[in-house]
Image: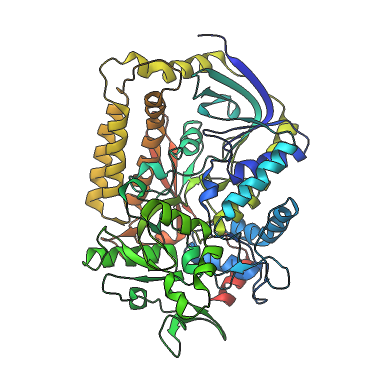
Amino acid sequence: MPQLEHIHYDVLVIGAGGAGLRAAIEASANGVTCGIVCKSLLGKAHTVMAEGGIAAAMANVDDRDNWKVHFADTMRGGQYLNNPRMAELHAQEAPECVRELEGWGALFDRTADGRILQRNFGGHKYPRLAHVGDRTGLEMIRTLQDAGIHRGVAVHMECAIFSLLKDGDRVVGAFGYEREKGRFLLFSAKAIVIATGGIGRAYSITSNSWEYTGDGQALAYDAGAELMDMEFVQFHPTGMVWPPSVRGILVTEGVRGEGGVLRNSLGKRFMFDDIPANYKASTADNEEEGWRYTQGDKEARRPPELLTRDHVARCIMREVRDGRGGPHGGVYLDISWIKERIANAQEHIKKKLPSMYHQFKQLADIDITSEPMEVGPTTHYVMGGVRVNGDTQMSNVPGLFAAGEVAAGLHGANRLGGNSLSDLLVFGRRAGRCAAEFAKEHGGGKINQADVDAAAARALAPFDRVGGAGPYQVQYQLQKDMQDLVGIVRRQDEMERALEVLKTLKERSAKVGVVGNREYNPGWHTALDLHNLMIVSEAVTLAAIDRKESRGAHFREDYPDKSAEFGKVNTVLKKGPNGEMQLRREPLPELKADLKQIIEEMK
């Protein structure tokens, strides 16, 4: 093997989204050397697609809000499968993290008296999302990048990590390659933080960009880490459905937060047909009044479009399935109707939703200020991921940390909108701090050259397979089958068929061949991604088969109700001694008395 470039850091962060950047900033602030590896260009992370806002109980718009209400909302949205310690820390620390971001230069929208403005979002009792129009994630990434670069954090762009390296039980390094030139890189690190995001590219219709192939989940799994709650895949209710070239691109929940309503092809606002028991009709059941959300003796107006994402997505699917959808298989999201209530509505929409206005104008030739958008569910987020300690974010593998979407625990069975960005800040910061502490306490380990040689051989194997299956065909079939068989609505027979399909595809992927050389070879990159996609797809399918109930984002047509038995367990997956995927049910963490009291008071 040619000479390797060998790079040393105290803490290596894999991923340059909100969690990765925040982890790197914190690690650097704690006095250790830190480097970031990102699969794409810096600034291209999926964090920029989180448009609606950062959930934090700052009480700037409604003074009844506080961390306890935010904690209870998060637990209720997650159907109480959340790690309660993570939900507690998240609710308590999110306001401080938002103010910290503001101190680093983030420019938030403002209230009339100059405080950070907050908007309504699905599942949140009060207006809680600090936002920058509908470009909050972009502003967050801009701010964090600026802070990270000025701290001297090194960044390796367009570099993919292929394997984690261990010394005994602990992680001590990572083996990767430059996507442009095909050269191998070897990183030594005393601690590693995985912050690679989600698994959306395991499905054919997704808001996720090409990078999101489950790399972090697969890297951690292969290194011996446990995965948890992988059955809970969130299908965002509103993605673009037309034209085909942009199918799946996110339409922010901020459209509904600013007053957008959902209608079927008959013009009916169908979300009124399926209201949970803890909602009641207001004095006028129309767009202006909406519904009142009741909580004890308190109430707040809440349009039914802002119910939790899993609920809204299923309602949309019902309308389409029953023949009341639009011409392209979606329903209509209408923000233009607010001209009946707001003077200068066109300018108001352009100001509040600038990205959505330009997105639909440029991609679909639709003016959202005067006509409705056709939208449908799109694979958006995975609540499951690497199982971590709630306080430190370390996995069961010493020295291996995870933060953001790649980590499990905070969101339980369903994530509330806006909690993703505050998750990145709160637990990115904790992961960076704890990784730095681990690096200081444990020092470096030894990298086994045989492990490096074996990783290089596996990476180059596709070049030796003349006449093998094409990687794109295997990837396409995987995405289609996962969408069809393990999608929004699931059944035992279909998921068992998915397991058989995955077994066949795994055999095909092991024979995939590529041609050309190592310099920017997309076929080679896709061939290497297949390994990760197979792992996360099998994990989702196995966990979904085992959970014989419907809860949160996991809906089974053959088990449509919640189960008391499954309401007490998380699903945990681990790599067995012979490479098989092993599943067990883990009892939920103990809920402290004070947290239990908060939940009871908020019910």
Residue 25 percent location from the top left of the image: 70, 41
Q: Residue at x 33, y 45 (%)?
A: 204
Does residue 335 appear anywhere in the picture? yes
Considering depth in this image, is 382 or 350 the residue closer to the camera?
Answer: 350
Q: Is residue 141 left or right of residue 321?
A: right
349 in relation to 20, above or below? below
Does residue 563 appear anywhere in the picture? no
Considering depth in this image, is 71 or 397 the residue closer to the camera?
Answer: 71
71 in relation to 544, above or below? below
Q: What is the residue that sits farthest to the top in this orientation?
A: 2
Considering depth in this image, is 491 or 398 the residue closer to the camera?
Answer: 491
Q: Is residue 94 left or right of residue 412?
A: right
Q: Quadrant of residue 52?
A: bottom right
Residue 116 percent location from the top left of the image: 68, 65
Image mark count: 0
Q: What is the residue that sits farthest to the bottom in this orientation?
A: 283
Residue 47 percent location from the top left of the image: 55, 48
